[in-house]
């Protein structure tokens, strides 16, 4: 158990309307009027307005956090609405940061929302995180998690991290440089090296129980309130693991790796490639976002939707391998594509799937397609490793439709 001093100094006195709004906080031991003033004076950054970011934003807004920053470069899609409760039907196609800002304003007009409608990268991470007292990471890409953790350690701010996968969730508090006498741990102490690419499917492939996002996100918000006010014991030094099917929580002790050097600067790459993507074994096309999925972008091993359209319109019949799930194909099919879910290219049966595609291609180039370009990049890389000429369609079927080819 790790009790920490309050992270934020108390701000101005509360107004009458705020005293009425936060009445249930004001009587809580460890919070009270002073803790509520600390919350009002706090600046908290939420990375990702997706499944975890949604409840985090809503509960921190309701709790009275004075300034909430939100980082997300994505727009609201209909598949988000199953779990991303900060967005609604009227928000479809809108930037998630704008949707989140309006939802927060409805919950608590006393909260200022700072939008960061951009992808978090090594070029902007330190600037974006700078000036915030605390960061909460609800992203689902390993490259982004390492980036957020490293940036937080460089800046000396604590980081509340959460993750979800199918029916399980994880929550921890990291702080590379906590107050004297407290052992600091970071994401790198729990995950010294990232898993092999494709070993951990994204939520589009593996699925996620929507209601569980609220459970895990609420714990993340609770950790933030405790850090700001100094109430209770934080999860620093512990990893909480939730099993929704068994309805159990268990805790694992986290210790600092004595051999790990403190992070004093972000990773860099001389050739211009994304260093965190490279660290995680990903091509530059995968990017570093990961808020319930990442749009692929042009890069080595990719083909743009316009290039693919030119091949088709030029009289050729490009081989298209659609690696989306069957229900996704049913919603928006590519005529003539060979459909093989991306999961077939991982695990014990991967060799069989690769061999079947190689036989089908018979030496011709394969254009791998998914919804947004993430799964296709992984499959294209797997095929290329086996000697099959394969390129990922950057942006996937979403980019194809957006470019007017639907």
Image: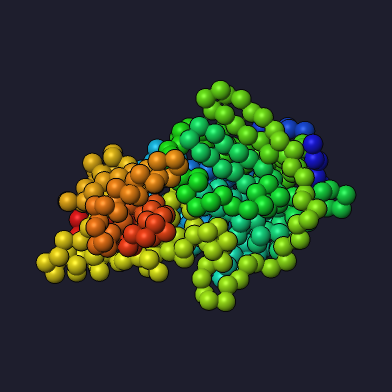
Q: Nearer the viewer, residue 179 or 360?
A: 360
Image x and y of residue 327, in percent: 28, 39
In this view, the residue farthest toward the right is 181
Taking the spot 30% from the left edge, 45% from the top edge, the residue there is: 340
Q: Would you identify the image quadrant in which residue 369 lies?
A: bottom left
Image x and y of residue 157, in percent: 71, 57
In this view, the residue farthest toward the left is 315
In this view, the residue farthest toward the bottom is 270
Q: Nearer the viewer, residue 60 or 211?
A: 211
Counting the numbered discs, the total is 0
Residue 193 visible, this angle: yes
Image x and y of residue 147, in percent: 60, 60
Q: Viewed as shown, does residue 284 lie left or right of 176? A: left
Taking the spot 47% from the left edge, 49% from the top edge, the residue there is: 198
Residue 121 drawn above or below residue 144: below
Taking the spot 66% from the left edge, 60% from the top edge, the residue there is: 150
Q: Viewed as shown, does residue 135 lie left or right of 234? A: left
Q: Viewed as shown, does residue 205 lie left or right of 400? A: right
Quarter placement of the N terminus:
top right
Residue 21 drawn above or below residue 46: above
Quarter placement of the C terminus:
bottom left
Residue 48 visible, this angle: no
Q: Viewed as shown, does residue 10 lie left or right of 377? A: right
Q: Nearer the viewer, residue 260 or 137?
A: 260
Taking the spot 54% from the left edge, 28% from the top edge, the residue there is: 244
Image x and y of residue 379, in percent: 38, 53
């Amino acid at each position: 158990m790790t009790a920490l001093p309050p992270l934020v100094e108390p701000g101005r006195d509360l107004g009458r309307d705020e005293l009425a709004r936060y009445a249930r906080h004001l009587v809580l031991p460890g919070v009270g009027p002073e803790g509520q003033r600390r919350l009002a004076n706090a600046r908290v950054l939420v990375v990702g307005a997706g499944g975890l970011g949604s409840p985090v934003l809503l509960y921190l807004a309701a709790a009275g956090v004075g300034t909430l920053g939100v980082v997300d470069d994505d727009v609201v899609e209909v598949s988000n609405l199953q779990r991303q409760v900060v967005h609604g039907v009227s928000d479809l196609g809108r930037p998630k940061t704008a949707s989140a800002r309006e939802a927060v304003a409805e919950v608590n007009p006393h909260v200022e929302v700072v939008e960061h409608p951009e992808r978090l990268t090594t070029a902007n991470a330190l600037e974006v995180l700078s000036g915030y007292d605390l960061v909460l990471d609800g992203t689902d890409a390993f490259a982004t998690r390492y980036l957020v953790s490293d940036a937080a350690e460089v800046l000396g701010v604590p980081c509340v991290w959460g993750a979800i996968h199918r029916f399980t969730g994880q929550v921890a508090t990291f702080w590379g440089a906590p107050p004297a006498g407290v052992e600091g741990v970071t994401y790198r102490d729990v995950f010294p090296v990232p898993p092999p690419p494709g070993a951990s499917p994204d939520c589009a492939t593996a699925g996620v129980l929507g209601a569980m996002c609220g459970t895990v996100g609420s714990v993340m918000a609770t950790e933030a309130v405790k850090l700001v006010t100094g109430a209770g014991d934080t999860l620093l030094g512990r990893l909480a693991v939730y099993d929704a099917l068994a309805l159990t929580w268990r805790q694992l002790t986290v210790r600092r790796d004595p051999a790990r050097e403190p992070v004093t600067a972000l990773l860099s790459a001389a050739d211009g490639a994304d260093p965190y993507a490279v660290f995680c074994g990903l091509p530059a096309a995968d990017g570093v976002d990961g808020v319930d999925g990442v749009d692929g972008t042009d890069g080595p091993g990719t083909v743009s939707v316009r290039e693919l359209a030119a091949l088709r319109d030029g009289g050729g019949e490009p081989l298209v391998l659609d690696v989306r799930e069957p229900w996704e194909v049913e919603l928006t099919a590519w005529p003539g594509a060979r459909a093989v879910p991306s999961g077939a290219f991982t695990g014990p049966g991967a060799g069989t799937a690769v061999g079947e595609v190689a036989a089908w291609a018979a030496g011709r180039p394969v254009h791998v397609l998914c919804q947004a370009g993430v799964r296709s990049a992984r499959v294209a890389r797997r095929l290329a490793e086996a000697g099959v000429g394969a390129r990922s369609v950057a942006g996937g079927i979403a980019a194809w439709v957006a470019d007017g080819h639907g």
